[in-house]
Image (cartoon, rainbow, N blue to C red):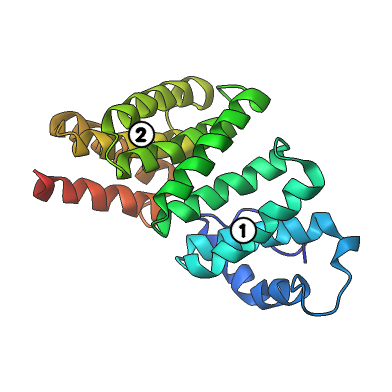
Amino acid sequence: LRDAVPADPWDNPECWPVWRQLLSHVLAVTDPGAGRDLDQVPDEVSWLLDRAASYLHTRGELRTARPLLDRAHALYRARLGDDHPDTLTTANNLGHVLFEVGEYAAARALCEDTLTRRRRVLGDDHPHTLTSANNLGHVLSKVGEYVAARALGEDILTRSRRVLGDDHRDTLTSAHTLAVVLSDVGEYAAARALGEDTLTRRRRVLGDDHPHTLISAHDLAAEEPRR
C-alpha cells in the first residue's frame, strides 16, 4: 500500500482517484484493533496514517483526519523523537488541522513548537521551516495578532522568493497568506496588488482549476466587501 498510494495528496487532485480507491484499505491495515502486529512495520504505519490524513484534510474531512494525525504524531515521537524531520512533518500537519477545526490555542502552541524545532534542526531558510512559519502566521492572524502575523508573513515571503523563486507553489502560498493579512489590517491597495500578482502566477503555474488558484480568485473577489 505504501508503494501504491501517491505520496503527496495535498491539493493534488490528479492523485485523488487513487486515494479514494485505496483509502479503505489503508484504514483497515493500520487499524490497531484489527489484531495485526503493527509494531513490526512502524515506518509504514506512521507514513500511511500521515498521508491518509493529508488526503482527508485536503478533501475537507477534518474530523476524520485529526485522529489519524494524532496517532501518526505519537508513533513518530515515541520512535524517532521530537526533533526528527518525520515527526516535525506530522506535527506541522496536525497543527494545520487543529487550526482549521478551530482549536486555536492548541494549534498555536504546536505550530510555535514545530517552527522553533525546524529552525534549529533545518535552518531558517529550509522550505519545511518556511511552511511551518506560514502555518503559524495563519494562526496569529486568526487570533488578531496582526502585527506579528504581518512581520512573519513578510519575512517568509522574502525568504521564499530568495530560496525557491517567485513562481514556486510554496512562495505563492506565502504571498497569498500575506495578502490576506494585509487586507485584515486595512492595507487594501497592497493586499490587492499582491493578490492579483499571486492569482496571475497561480493561473500560469498551476492552471485555472487548481484549488490554490481558486482560493486566490475567491479571496481577491472578496476583498471589496471587506472594505
Question: For the residue carrying disc 1, how many other residues have a C-alpha within 10 Å: few (<14), some (14-19), or many (20+)?
Answer: many
Q: Residue at x 47, y 26 (%)?
A: 160
N-term-proximal mark, 1 vs 2: 1
The reply to whether callout 1 and callout 2 are in contact (CB within 8 Å) is no
Q: Amino acid at mark 1?
A: Leu
Residue 175 position, x and y percent, is 36, 34
Image-based side of 160 in relation to 220, left or right: right
Element class at badge 1 = helix
Real-space CA distance between mark 1 and mark 2, rounded to the nearest whole angstrom: 27 Å
Q: Nearer the viewer, mark 1 or mark 2?
A: 1
Q: Residue at x 56, y 36 (%)?
A: 113
Q: Residue at x 32, y 37 (%)?
A: 198
Q: Across the whole image, how many numbered discs are drawn on residues?
A: 2
Residue designated by label 1: 69
Residue placed most toward the observer, 118 or 102? 102
Image-based side of 146 in relation to 27, left or right: left
Question: Residue 117, located in which quarter of the rendered image?
Answer: top right
Q: Residue at x 36, y 50 (%)?
A: 213
Residue designated by label 2: 175
Element class at badge 2 = helix
User: Is residue 51 among what the camera can see?
Assistant: no
